[in-house]
Image (spheres, rainbow, N blue to C red):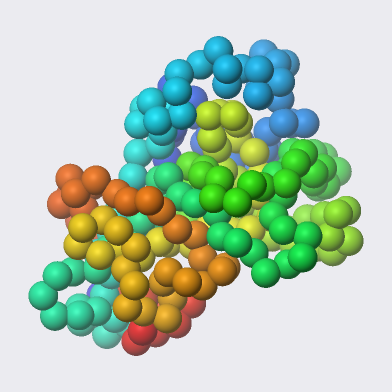
Amino acid sequence: MHRINRRPLVTLGAVSLIAALSACSGASEGLGNDGADPSERAQQQVSPEQWYAENCPSTVAKVTRFDGKPIQEGDPVYALIAGRGTVPQDGRDEGLRLYSYDQAQNSFTALRAVEQGEEFCFDSSVETTEGYSQPLDDDVEFAPVASPEYPDGVWIDHGANPIPLDSNGKLFPNAHWSAGDEFYWGTTGVPSEDLESATETIDDCEFGGCGG
């Protein structure tokens, strides 16, 4: 059985998040290197669709059971390990938020609430960082993500999981760790060529349960 290798976040086109994410430096105060507000920069940049196409490549793996056997006979099941994903509808009353990160103080500052159905470029293999959230008054796990609004990276108070896909690149519906769970990320779909290029495998234990 071969599991997908854990690795730093992929380079997002011309915008590299490697230093920000693997070193856990994050996006300071939600601003880019030029000091401009991210929402203002986004208005001067390309459309969201073009940004994701250029800066958020998909990383896909085939899913097996913990014993290496296929999840189902016939059409394979895939997992989107990194790419464009939709944040889950978290069960907390406060909802999810975006944060900037002060590495020296190991503190996260809330920037704004995450809107329903909002998408980000994520990498489920990147280690999360534990820190204190003042709005939640608790220590939680934060994960780095990026978007056209925050091309240099931002933090979210929810770790991204691999997203299960069917052979058409849509959410795989026939497992307890797939669509319908409010704590799991989703996707509007992955191009078929990204599925065809998948060479790695990942077992379904990576989704929070085995033999689903």
Question: Residue most toward the front?
Answer: 116
User: Relative to the observer, which residue lies in front, 201 or 194?
Assistant: 194
Q: In the displayed structure, does residue 201 sit left or right of residue 187? A: left
Point out residue 209 in the picture as x, y percentages from the top left corner: 45, 82
Q: Residue furthest left?
A: 74
Q: Depth check: 26 or 42 in front?
A: 42
Q: Is residue 126 visible?
A: no
Judged left or right of residue 24, residue 205 is: left
| Whole-percent x, y for residue 133 in the image | 82, 55
164 on left or right of 41: left
Up/down of 48 relative to 81, above or below: above
| Residue at the image point whose x is 80% and y is 44% from the top | 110
Locate residue 122, reporting x and y percent: 49, 47
The structure residue drawn at horizontal position 21% and vertical position 58%, both measured from the top left corner, is 168
Q: State which quarter of the image contains the N terminus.
A: bottom left
Q: Name which residue lies at 67% across and 13% down.
A: 34
In depth, the one of 170 and 155 nearer the eye is 170
The answer to which of 193 and 93 lies nearer the viewer is 93
